[in-house]
Image: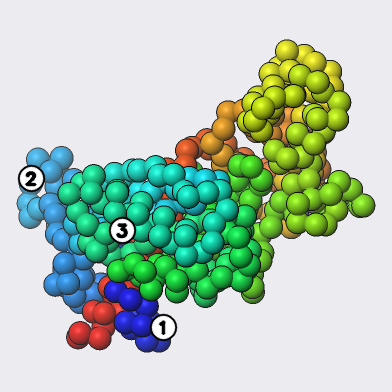
Amino acid sequence: MARQERPPGGPDQRGMNRQQVVEVIRNAGQIARIDIAQKTGVSPATVTAITSDLIGAGLIEEVASDEARTSGGRGRPRVALRVRGAAHLVAGVKVSFGTLSLVLIDFEGTTIVEHDAELSGPRLAPDVLSRDILRGLDAITAKIGRVTADISGLGVGLAGTINAPEGFVHWSPSLTERNVQLRDMLEALLPMPVFLDNDANLVAKAEQLFGEARGVSDFIVVTIEQGVGMGIVIDGQIYRGTRGCGAEFGHIKVHLDGALCRCGQRGCLEAYVSDYALLREADVSLPVAAGPSRSERLEALFSAAHAGDHTAETILDRASRMFAMGLANIVNIFDPKLIILSGERMSRDFLYSDDVISAMRDEVVQVDAPPPEVKIHKWGDSMWAKGAAAYAMEGVTELAVRRLAIDA
Ligand SMILES: [Zn+2]
């Protein structure tokens, strides 16, 4: 479906209730109507009407509840509802440095297949990136005997400053141009609606739906890749700021007139903890860090620190303490219930260490109540893509529910 075919306007109350009911069923796996009413605050009569519409549209289906099956079948079997997985095929793509990670999920959120593809380069013109994404979708759908046109919605996550509601990229390290209306470009090329967001926000979405933050309404995800990113969830919703420029954890200032950051300013957290910051220090003072590639030089730095090299240790130690200070600043502002440190590489262990977490705890405002819980969640690129797919699934649900209202 091309963008111009999106139903106009926002959802009405009935539409919002329908969408909420689908989300509650999806989160529960399976759930009885009476429990949906209790969880949503929607009246049982309205829940019955809504679920009947959703069953009619093929979005959900009735099943005998697990409870009925395990209780030996006494009395009338309890009927539960579940989301119909086959209703929609949804794709997620994470754009990384030179590579694409793709995933297809069904409408229940179950992963069907994953695929990794090479990009034409680390930084691309928007039309080249769009064609690379199309090629990736053709390849992943071919793996399961489907075609790209079978996909109901595509979520795309990339690093940078992105206005998600507008599908607009202010800046991304993956693109050679600034100020790109990327969602519209993708929708002109692809046969499905596209949902675009900052990759750290999509990790927050994945943590909320599949990960460590299920059932938590206020939490913060800090992502550690080449740089550091952040996703803020308040009252169950991702907080994006007015221009989509919020949650720039990597560019909070931790030092007045400090080290130069690749954003052009000084004293940013990223200028102390990112790959390039560590290498900048290592290149000055640590001959073992000399090597042909960036990742080899980093590995050399990490192994030197492990082997007890004092200079290497001080480089990682300073980065850890800066990182702990950044985390403490977040806690002092947001006071979240939970902070998730989310990343994929074991080599960043110095940022996940107990020392970092206890340093953070020492620097937060002290009250007679337990500090926020900190969870460490290491996962791979496929989970970033799954977050993108989860975001698209919400969008596909909203569109399906709106179409239901128009057809009614
Ligand atoms: Zn910066």
Q: Which residue lies under the disc numbered 2? A: 73
Q: Nearer the viewer, residue 257 or 237?
A: 257
SS class, disc 1: loop
Check the image and name the residue furthest to the top. 307
**What is the tally of numbered marks visible in this picture?**
3
- The answer to whether the residue labelled 3 contacts the one labelled 1, judged by CB atoms less than 8 Å apart, is no
Nearest to viewer (mark 2 / mark 3): 3
Please determine whether, in this image, residue 363 is positioned above or below residue 14: above
Question: Crowdedness of circle 1 by 10 Å Cα count: few (<14), some, many (20+)?
Answer: few
Q: Which residue lies under the disc numbered 3? A: 90
SS class, disc 3: strand
Looking at the image, can residue 42 be seen? no
Q: CA distance from mark 1 to mark 2?
A: 44 Å
Q: Which residue type does callout 2 highlight? A: Gly
Q: Which residue lies under the disc numbered 1? A: 10
Q: Which residue type does callout 1 highlight? A: Gly
SS class, disc 2: loop
Give the x, y percent position of residue 306.
71, 17
Q: Nearer the viewer, residue 21 or 8?
A: 8
Q: Which residue type does callout 3 highlight? A: Val
